Amino acid sequence: MTEIELLGRRLRYRPVRVTTPDGLAIAAQDWGERARGRDVLLLHGYCQAGLSWLPQTSGALARRHRLVTYDLRGHGGSDKPIDPVFYREPTRWADEVTAVIETLGLDRPILVAWSYAGRVALDYLTCRGSGAVSGLVLVSGTSVMSRHVAGPATPEMRRMAEALDFGENLVATRAFLTRCTAEPIDPAALALMLTWNLAVPPPVRQALGGRPADYDATLAALDIPVLVIHGDRDAVNLPAMSEHTVRRCPRARMLLYPGVGHIPFWEAPERFDTDLAAFIDTLAGR
């Protein structure tokens, strides 16, 4: 087991190395292998890391359910190939999620996907179907690429990918992070987030963006329960993103958090944990 302290919280998890079919080493973290509740796979967003879910993995939710996080390819402690081909093909993302589920022996987990990971989860569901999972939670999750759902923080995110000079990259990344929350975030938390954001090389950031996002048919065909959570002050993905998801997916219901930005599970952790736990409870028998 690994034990660390971050932001005054003692964290304890089992690190697991997962190998994808295309040969990448993926860093996964098992936070509750002895928990008696459901298996929950938490997927982080663009330029983030498994540690993004610190409020959940260090709290009561992890004591009740088996939470598993992992660093997406190109992020955190996972391999970071520069060749764009590793990020452009939906099947590679689907294979990655499958490899994590199988390596950790997850039993029909609930997929909880934040921001860009909405694409990762939908790539998985498009390519592999829903037979191995019980439910889907999209948290400010990307489900379409369109100007009408892009928030005012889009220019900062674009500069993050374009800035090859380290100094410029640092400034652009910090500017983006300050736009992710509705209210100013604690400086220590901002510094921590900046650390894992800077672990993603600019060429990887460039490769992640711009690929097609045609998930309407997948959303329409989903046969598992879907919960959509979005902050009404999200400057990255506008609430219109989640409204699009709900319109396309008959099984989805949406919760809009007032006064919250792009990171509901960090800005309103108690409400988020309560809503997620309630959703998990509805899946009894699935």
Image (tube, rainbow, N blue to C red):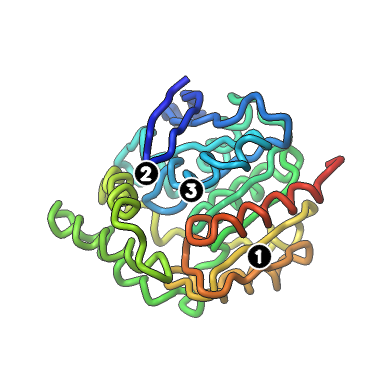
Question: In this view of the protein, can residue 168 be seen by the observer?
Answer: yes
Residue corresponding to mark 1? 216
- Residue 19 x/y as whole percent: 48, 25
In this image, 205 relative to 17: left or right? Answer: left
The label number, if any, that marks residue 75 in the structure image: none
Residues packed near mark 2 inside 10 Å, few (<14), some (14 to 19) or many (20 plus):
few
Q: Give the SS element for disc 2.
A: loop
Q: From the viewer's perspective, is residue 257 above or below residue 128?
A: below
- Residue 23 x/y as whole percent: 44, 27
Q: Give the SS element for disc 3.
A: loop
Instruction: Tell me the quarter of the picture where residue 60 sits.
Output: top right
Residue corresponding to mark 2? 7
Residue corresponding to mark 3? 44
Residue drawn at 69 percent across, 61 percent down: 219
- Residue 273 x/y as whole percent: 62, 52
In this image, 269 relative to 36: left or right? Answer: left
- Out of 47 and 132, give the one closest to the viewer: 47
Give the amino acid type for the residue marked by disc 1 in the picture: Asp
Total marks shown come to 3
In this image, 131 relative to 87: left or right? Answer: right
The residue furthest bottom is: 148
Q: From the viewer's perspective, is residue 162 above or below residue 37?
A: below
Give the amino acid type for the residue marked by disc 2 in the picture: Leu
Q: Decide: marks 2, 3 in contact (CB < 8 A)?
A: no
In this image, 192 relative to 261: left or right? Answer: left
Q: Give the SS element for disc 1.
A: helix
